[in-house]
Amino acid sequence: MRYLIQGTSFLFTVAALLLAPPLAPAGDVNTCSLTGAWRGEIAVVGGMLDVGMAGSGFTQARLEESAGSVTGVLSGPGFTASVAGRRQGNRLDTSSWVSTGHGSGSLPFTMTLVSCDRLVGELERSPFKLERVR
């Protein structure tokens, strides 16, 4: 009788696992939200950022995501960029409105979520990498 009860319990456990909805794989960046504070480094490489006297170094971002729409601000030495666009999987390709000490204008902005706590991207041609602030 004891083996019958243990066997039945085992079958219920297996059935529950098989019928459970699938979970996203660990680290699936498509399920991670971009909302929050981020910080890291940018390397200014020519273009408007360089002409506008923006510098390489510490950069930070504050992003908000809702139903695939992403808005936020990326700022670094001598510049501020306002970002708005639609997320496609783990990427955001859009333009941003950038202000420097010597002018402002629209620049291409690309960002890829590498992990739930790390993203990389380019503002114009200047690469940046950011980590989530906890």
Image (cartoon, rainbow, N blue to C red):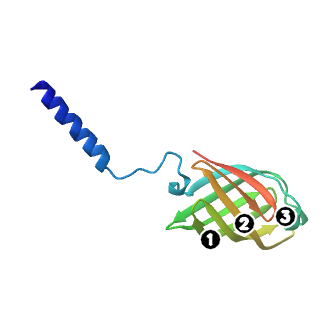
Q: Quadrant of the N terminus?
A: top left
* Label 2–label 3 contact, CB within 8 A: no
Q: x and y percent of residue 49 in the render? A: 84, 64
Disc nearer the start of the sequence (2/1) = 1
Q: Name the residue under label 3.
A: 49
Q: x and y percent of residue 39 in the render? A: 68, 50
Is 58 displayed left or right of 22 in the figure? right
State the residue in front, 95 or 89: 89
Is 117 displayed left or right of 127 in the figure? left
Q: Name the residue under label 1.
A: 85
Q: Mark 2 points at which residue?
A: 109
State the residue in front, 107 or 76: 107
Amino acid type shown at disc 2: Phe
Q: Which residue is drawn at 79% across and 65% down?
A: 124
Residue found at the far top of this picture: 2
Q: In which quarter of the image is the C terminus?
A: top right
Q: x and y percent of residue 130 in the render? A: 68, 50
Question: In the rendered view, would you say 30 is above or below 25?
Answer: below
Amino acid type shown at disc 1: Gly
Disc nearer the start of the sequence (2/3) = 3
Query: Alpha carbon of mark 3 to alpha carbon of mark 1: how far?
Result: 21 Å
* Label 2–label 1 contact, CB within 8 A: yes
Disc nearer the start of the sequence (3/1) = 3
Is label 3 in a helix, a strand or a loop?
A: helix
Query: Alpha carbon of mark 2 to alpha carbon of mark 1: how far?
Result: 10 Å
